[in-house]
Image (cartoon, rainbow, N blue to C red):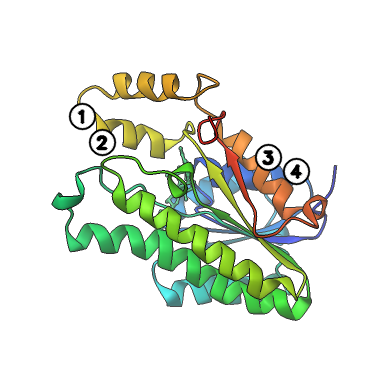
Amino acid sequence: MSRFMDKVIIITGAAGGIGKEVARRLASEGAKLTLVDVNEEAIENMVSELQLQEDNVLVVKADVSKEQDVKNYVEKTVEKFGQIDGFANNAGVEGPAKPLEELTEKDFDFVYNINVKGALFGIKYVLPVMKKQKRGSIVNTSSVAGLIGSPGMVLYNSSKHALMGINKVAAIEAADYNVRVNTVNPGVINTRMMRQIEANVAPGSAEAARAAYNEAVPMKRYGEPQEVANVIVFLLSDEASYVSSSSYTVDGGLFNM
Ligand SMILES: NC(=O)c1ccc[n+]([C@@H]2O[C@H](COP(=O)([O-])OP(=O)(O)OC[C@H]3O[C@@H](n4cnc5c(N)ncnc54)[C@H](O)[C@@H]3O)[C@@H](O)[C@H]2O)c1
């Protein structure tokens, strides 16, 4: 299948568990990719692992919490490829696990600057390019945490709720320009992030936390990053041509049980 032949897609958080699987799928279907991450070494390793050719890939080290970095990855993409067909707005951090009343301003700024400001400013700079082209698809990686509350995770949960609001506004503002904006809302997925959350919520007994998460999911297992990538790639594709302002849970039935 070559649904993405010569399409240009930006992926943020590209070196992470989910981002890398999105990149793998898109590359296998002919896309040209801008891979954005704060961890440059990890993206460089990924470029060789996925055997991406220089003509088809642009690596940009960026901290999405900095507006100038965001502006730069968008400008560099247009400079190299001349267009942006899709944007997997995926970089995110879990932040600390602690009761709400123990949070510090530093905790707040860290999580919100990446998960909210970073995602919003990504759309701010990608959208004008897509509007001009009169086509494009933006997929924001929110979370089941953007739909429910989890004790000890107020910053992560509320930042992912904020992204749901950003998604709705962006979808309306973009609709007239044939630009679609959707969220994917993963549940518990086997990546570094869940390993860290398990350790944070149950220091010294991450295994027990993992078992409890497994038990909580109706399908009784974690999802794999490929299973989230499948949905992101669908939303980026023309097969989702009438899907906008929607949210797709990928969570083994967790949210709707
Ligand atoms: N793993 C899960 O269970 C799960 C569930 C729901 C939602 N999500 C969301 O999926 C997205 C991807 O998460 P993942 O599971 O692949 O985690 P991950 O930790 O494997 O990947 C996150 C990536 O984002 C990058 N990143 C972090 N801060 C950045 C910054 N300031 N600028 C640029 N890049 C930055 C990291 O270097 C990393 O490569 C995140 O938005 C996360 O909140 C994950």
Q: Is residue 156 left or right of residue 5?
A: left
Q: CA distance from mark 3 to mark 4?
A: 13 Å
Q: Amino acid at mark 2?
A: Asn
- The residue that mark 3 highlights is 230
- The quadrant holding residue 35 is bottom right
In the rendered structure, find residue 68 and report the number of the disc placed on it. Answer: none
Contact flag, marks 1 and 3 (Cβ < 8 Å): no
Front residue of 158/193: it is: 158
> Badge 2, how many Cα within 10 Å: few under 14, some, many 20+?
some
Q: Position of residue 144 (x, y in %)?
A: 48, 42
The residue located at (78%, 52%) in the rendering is: 240
Q: Amino acid at mark 3?
A: Asn
> Badge 1, how many Cα within 10 Å: few under 14, some, many 20+?
few
Q: Is residue 118 left or right of residue 185?
A: left
Q: Which one is earlier in the sequence, the residue at label 1 or at label 3?
A: 1
Q: Is residue 162 left or right of residue 21?
A: left
Question: Is ligand 1 within 8 Å of the beta carbon of the residue shown at mark 2?
Answer: no
- The residue that mark 4 highlights is 28
Q: Nearer the viewer, mark 2 or mark 4?
A: 2
Q: Amino acid at mark 1?
A: Pro
> Badge 3, how many Cα within 10 Å: few under 14, some, many 20+?
some
The residue located at (40%, 25%) in the rendering is: 213
Which quadrant of the figure contains the N terminus?
Answer: top right
